[in-house]
Amino acid sequence: MVSVRNLRYVYEGGIEALKNINLDIASGEYMALVGGNGSGKTTLAKHFNGLLRPTGGKVFIMGRPAAEMSVAELSRIVGYAFQNPDHQLFCSTVEEEIAFGPRNLGFAEVQTKERVGYAAETLELEDVLEKPPASMDLGTRRRVSIASVIAMDPKVLILDEPTTGLDADETKALMGIVSGLNREGRTVVLITHEMKLVSEHANRVVVMLDGRIVLDSDARGAFSDLELLKRCSLLPPPVTCLAHRLSHLGVSREVLSTDELVFELTRPGGDRR
Amino acid sequence: MTGFMDFYTPGSTFLHRMDPRVKILAVVLLSLLAFILSQLLYLLVLFAFIFLLLYLARVSFGKAVFALKFLFRFMALVVVLWPLFDPVGTPVLFELGILKVTLPAIERGVAAALRIGCLATVWYILMFTTQQRDLVHALVRMGLRFDFGLALAIALRFIPTFSYTIEAIKDAQRARGMELEKGGLLRRSRNYVAVLLPAIVSAIRTADTLSLTLQSRAYGARRDRTYLRELRMRRSDFVALSVAVALFVLPAVAKYILAVTI
Amino acid sequence: MPALRMRDVRFRHDGSSSWALDGVSVNVEEGEFVAVLGPNGAGKSTFCLLCNGLAPHAVGGVVEGSIEVFGLDVSKRSVPEMSASVGMVFQEPESQLFCMSVEEEVAFGPENLGVPRAEIADRVEWALEQVGLKGFNERPPATLSGGQKQRAAIAAAISMRPRMLVLDEPAYALDPVGRVELYSLLRGLVEKHGVTVIVAEREAEDVAPVCDRMVLLRKGRIARDGPPRELLREPDLLVGAGVSPPQLSELAARLRKRVRGADLSFFTLEEAEREISEKVLSRPGGR
């Protein structure tokens, strides 16, 4: 779905934000793109929808070179939901907001209505379609922003720190919706530094440091090297850290959740050593 | 991220160390002087003097070129266009229909260009050698109400942040298929609203928190607030001030009181 | 004299029909580190704004009940007056730093209070050192990282030498490492200088290890109030109140249920390691 070859990106001013990135994202994956501030994760993601163009190397979206397509064209395939929904919201009703994308892409009114309906239903916004986005709380505004991206029917959905500012229940609800989108077949790229979220949802983890990919594995593999994560300013979930500490007693290190650790600690012994 | 119109280059020249109040005053006086002088020769001297100051400010060549590139082009434009619109005087050098190029007009054009050059360069020198916050502080010390000084400082501080936010908003909307450059007038206006509205909302939100922060830091608690930074005039500052005043007063007196043509 | 005393406090924002705080009574002693936890909309921000008078003086609304900070009736004092006793830090670091250098920022408060120049200089150095930004005086705020910005905002608040510091979701814009550093900084302020700290948060994970007391806020009312160890023995309490408990506490609670007789009450990784190796893994026979 997304292919990156020898990607290099240098900012105006000379800072090399991306140094020789090679990455393939397959259709339907749920990938977490993680790293500390300045690791390059957002810079990389912005190449997927053309907001940034490579200084060197190539980006392919669905087999076609991204260089051949404009940002608008790419937005049909790769949807990008930004961290701050208020940077996107400006319409007087939620419905208009969600329709903005499809209308920009030239969808016919009938099709637009259909897309809006689908997006509103998926993001649980049917009840507030007539309300102004500005009057709603952060969680709802974020859902409106994601809905407005989904309405364009992208095959890939990039979410930049979607749970910032959300409380426990809101986070659960939103991540549930995102999982649903992934199950539908959409490729999800989750940019985050919350490792708990990663451990609960992603099936692939790409860790970046200083403009390079330093780890690319399934979720379990990602949490096996705590030292690396620490160097990247990432904190693994406490239960994973605990599992590592208890590994000398036979506890598996590859523990991603409380459930798993409880199971590990309470399963019948004997096979432990 | 450099500040808005932040041309400051660190250094330790006498210009850098000069009291900012003296610098502001000197720049104002020299600007006025450029208008008092009308003889080409004297204007050239002033221009050269100002460029000498620029050299003494040890500004990097690259930065100076960048700032002056536009200025020189503009000055050249003035020299070329002036005579075309000012047909007064003799001797006439060239005539073609209504177009009359006279020597005095060329001289006036050059004089105008030199004045612009003096003005712009002397203000550049001020900005190259003075940090923005020192400028604002100097203005407050010279009588500007603290509230206005604070408002000015806050504006200067937030302009780069604001433009950064606007870029982020543009990116976010482009990711929704919005194409700023395309479309008819109606479409384009709609697109600008898509960028402007979130930008304004963002600015208001920031202003809101800012206002709460200011109050939480006792802004307005007393009329007699103290200042951490002190501006004290040293001997060199008094000397510079006297030089600047003299440079202004002498020609002014010569021109307006003694009726000398300068 | 308690640092903060709220009696039956209710607050309704202008233009709103519901009470953001609906009958809150709480005492905070001087030198306590209190975490006010709750989901979005619980009233945490309102609680913070009431501590120094921003609500109702700056953020319009109706207050009922009494709020006293170090014995001073907040409703009868202006925000600038209160600011000498109560420092305030908000979520978004960017909009709290408005000066062109860190030094000016930190000096701003004391300057407004009319503190003599020499003392301001001392306070600036002291505040910067406390937050780990020593030497950052000349830096423009725009060049700082998120964590550094927030620390600068804290320095700017503590340079006024308030006896109480109120922070509304200060870790909002920070990455996980930054959050841990922030909270240990705050803990340091409490222990070294006896500052009373009140923090509003959505999650318990980062703040639980450092606070003395957790106050659960739900729909404008206090659901529970007690020391973290006590509250976290029943993480479901937090979950029910819409706050995610620390993962280790959840683990402890689940293990207590699964492993009969094991009294597990660990809180930190060290304690967890110790208790689990002693009580869970070394049990003879089945686990």
Image: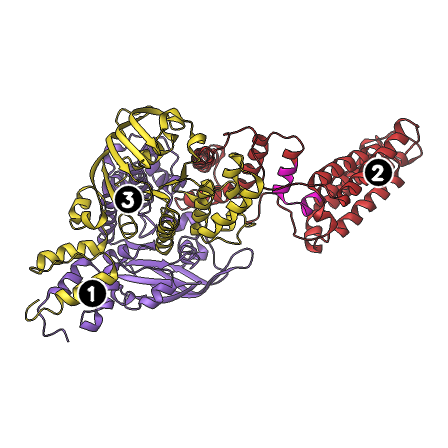
Q: Is residue B47 left or right of residue A36?
A: right
Comparing A205 with C113, the one in front is: C113
The residue mark sitting in front, 1 or 2, is: 1
Answer left or right for B231 relative to A37. right
> Badge 1: few (under 14), some or many (20 or more) residues near its Cα, within 10 Å?
some
Identify residue type, mark 1: Arg
Give the main secondary structure of the magenta stretch.
helix
Q: Which residue is mark 2?
A: B247
* Residue furthest front as drawn: C1
Residue C160 drawn at (x, y percent): 47, 40
Q: Horizontal and vertical percent for residue B107? A: 87, 37
Q: Residue at x 77, y 45 (%)?
A: B236
- Per the image, label 1 sits on a secondary structure element best described as helix
Residue labelled with disc 3: C202
Q: Residues within 10 Å of mark 3 (few under 14, many from 20)?
A: many
Q: Which residues are magenta?
A: B126-138
Q: Chain drawn red, letter?
A: B
- Quarter of the image with the C terminus of chain C is bottom left
Regarding residue C278, the answer to whether it shows in the image is yes
- Name the side, left or right, on which B174 lies relative to C68: right
- Residue that label 1 marks: C274
Same chain for the residues under marks 1 and 2 in the image: no
* Nearest to N terminus: mark 1 or mark 3: 3
Q: Are marks 3 and 2 in contact (CB under 8 Å)?
A: no
Q: Report the amino acid beneath label 3.
A: Arg
Is residue A126 depicted above or below B49 in this figure? above
- Dot 3: what SS? loop
Q: CA distance from mark 1 to mark 2?
A: 82 Å
Q: Amino acid at mark 2?
A: Leu
Q: Colour of chain A?
A: purple
